[in-house]
Image: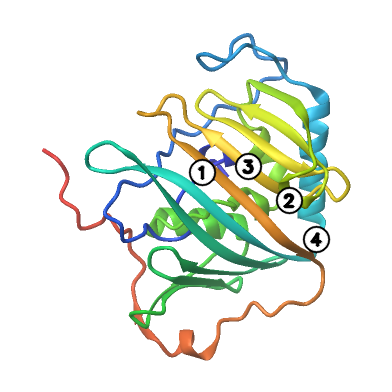
């Protein structure tokens, strides 16, 4: 996917919340990764190059996630969005995620903001709003990666944990890197021993906490140094369950809801002259 973790991880959890604030910044797609350590780094960051050990930790995480026949987890995204006076405000969304490979996905987002539910069964994707009892339904491609791209292109739907559920997380994580190194270990994050991996491309600087034994991501923090105010984001991942046969089908209330078309939330906003 062109929208890599470093450019899409900290977007809204499903649809833009009803705060009237601006959505988090989405930097342009990264350039392909260099074959050798980068000669330059983002402004204000020393050119530390690419540490093979950091890449090995990312690969181990990717292998664990991609190799699971099914997985479920809780994702809590906390992000900055400026108020009208420019003051940075913090907002939080929670998503309960269930994935069944190769092409089943369920995302329940109770809030903050408007609650929403998302279902995908390899043929159809559905976005449901419980409060209004409305469901948007559209045909979808047969792979999760292609579906995620279509959901964004068609309705501006994207998830802050996208690159944890694609077919090859490492590919998305490593695109455009100018630096990657291990910054230490933590025994606090996620209640377990984690390796702290710092990565960056030309637009985003990020740190990921990865379980030292189970190779599962527990937290990620990022800053966008080129965006006004250098906004910061955090993603906490917990309640991991791998394997089994989880039920990811849409309940009857969703299939019986009033149907509407998928559309981008900004489709009716007049363009500035």
> Dots 4 and 3: beta carbons under 8 Å?
no
Q: Earlier in the sequence, mark 4 or mark 1?
A: 1
Mark 1 sits on what residue?
A: 8
Whether label 4 touches label 2, CB < 8 Å: no
Looking at the image, do the residues carrying marks 3 and 1 touch, with CB atoms under 8 Å apart? no
Q: In whole angstroms, how far apart are the C-alphas of marks 3 and 1?
A: 13 Å
Q: Quadrant of the C terminus?
A: top left
Residue 70 shows in the view: yes
Task: Give the labeled residue for mark 3.
Answer: 220
| Mark 3 surroundings: few (<14), some (14-19) or many (≥20) residues within 10 A | many
From the image, state whether disc 2 or disc 1 is nearer to you: 2
**Residue at the front extreme of this rendering:** 188
Question: Closer to us: mark 3 or mark 1?
Answer: 3
Say which mark, if any, is on residue 190.
2
Residue most toward the left? 273
Report helix, strand or loop for mark 1: helix
Residue 21 spot, x, y in % from top left? 29, 49
- What is the crowding at mark 4: few (fewer than 14 residues within 10 Å), some, or many (at least 20)? some
Label 3, label 2: how far apart the Cα atoms are: 11 Å
Asked if the residue under mark 1 is in contact with the one under mark 2, i.e. CB atoms within 8 Å, the reply is no
């Amino acid at each position: 996917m062109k929208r890599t973790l470093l450019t899409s991880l900290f977007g809204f959890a499903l649809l833009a919340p009803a705060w009237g604030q601006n959505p988090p910044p989405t930097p342009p797609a990264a350039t392909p990764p260099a074959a050798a350590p980068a000669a330059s780094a983002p402004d204000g960051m020393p050119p530390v190059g690419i540490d093979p050990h950091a890449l090995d930790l990312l690969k181990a995480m990717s292998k664990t996630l991609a190799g699971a026949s099914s997985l479920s987890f809780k994702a809590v995204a906390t992000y900055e969005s400026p108020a009208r006076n420019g003051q940075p405000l913090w907002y939080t969304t929670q998503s309960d995620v269930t994935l069944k490979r190769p092409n089943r996905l369920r995302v329940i987002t109770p809030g903050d903001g408007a609650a929403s539910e998302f279902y995908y069964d390899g043929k159809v994707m559905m976005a449901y709003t419980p409060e209004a009892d409305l469901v948007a339904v559209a045909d979808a491609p047969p792979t999760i990666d292609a579906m995620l791209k279509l959901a964004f292109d068609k309705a501006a739907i994207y998830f802050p944990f996208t690159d944890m559920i694609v077919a090859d997380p490492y590919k998305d994580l490593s695109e455009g890197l100018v630096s990657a190194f291990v910054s230490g270990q933590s025994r606090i994050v996620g209640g377990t021993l984690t390796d702290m991996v710092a990565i960056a491309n030309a637009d985003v600087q990020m740190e990921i906490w990865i379980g030292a034994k189970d190779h599962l991501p527990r937290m990620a923090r990022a800053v966008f140094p080129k965006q006004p105010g250098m906004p910061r984001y955090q993603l906490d991942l917990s309640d991991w369950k791998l394997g089994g046969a989880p039920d990811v089908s849409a309940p009857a209330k969703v299939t019986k809801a009033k149907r509407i078309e998928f559309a981008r939330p900004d489709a009716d906003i007049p363009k500035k002259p």
